[in-house]
Amino acid sequence: MRRRLEQGHIQVYTGEGKGKTTCAFGLALRAVGQGLQVYLIQFLKGQDTGELKAAQRLAPELTVQGFGRPVLVNLRNPTPEDLALARDGLDLARRVIAGGDYDLVVLDEINVALAYNLIPLKEVLDMLKRRPAGVEVVLTGRAAPPELIDAADLVTEMVPRKHYWDKGTKARQGIEW
């Protein structure tokens, strides 16, 4: 019989600083290493990143599904396709969480989708309230809504103090993506 969590919690990783997704993937890696099943759903991301390539090596213990196009979303004026992809991601999240087969469910960049009203906050809060007791949920992204922060058991805010981008360093393969 595989290991299960007795009690899952809600974690939020937010803030303007770098490292929210990286932190969530690190937790996913740790969970897989301890025999837990992990499902990671990415909102607003459709690029082929290093995280996705590494996650494929950890399947089936780690499943990653992206819901986004390989371009930046205009968050103030999302396309109908962007809205449909965000809705599809939320529908999958609801099924995965309610099913209780995964110990850890990461909803990467969902906070941004919430902040720009691509998906309804009420539905996300309801999904979190109804989750099975042993399911841990991590929600990442800038601008986490106050209601989500209130519902969380753990909140980590990434605060930028210094960044090499400010000196002109471009995003680097294997480090930023």
Image (cartoon, helix red, strand yellow):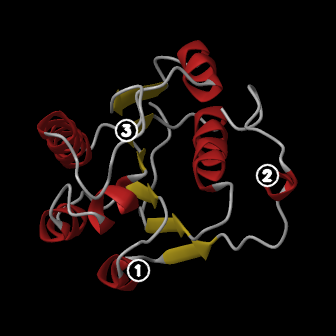
Mark 3 or mark 2: name the one nearer the start of the chain: 3
Percent across and percent down for residue 105 are: 40, 46
Percent across and percent down for residue 98 are: 18, 48
Q: Which mark is residue 166?
A: none
Which is in the foreground here, disc 2 or disc 1?
2
Numbered disc 3: secondary structure: strand
- Vertical order, 107 against 53 (above or below): below
Percent across and percent down for residue 51 are: 61, 28
Q: Residue at x 41, y 30 (%)?
A: 71
Which is in the foreground here, disc 3 or disc 2?
2
Q: Which mark is residue 165?
A: 2
What is the crowding at mark 3: few (fewer than 14 residues within 10 Å), some, or many (at least 20)?
many
Mark 1 or mark 3: name the one nearer the start of the chain: 3
Q: Which residue is mark 1?
A: 149
Mark 2 or mark 1: name the one nearer the start of the chain: 1
Residue at the top extreme?
Answer: 57
Q: Residue at x 30, y 83 (%)?
A: 147
Q: Amino acid at mark 3?
A: Ile
Q: Amino acid at mark 2?
A: Trp
Q: Which residue is mark 3?
A: 41
On the question of residue 134 being in view, the answer is no
What is the crowding at mark 1: few (fewer than 14 residues within 10 Å), some, or many (at least 20)?
some
Q: Is disc 2 in contact with disc 1, using a CB cutoff of under 8 Å?
A: no
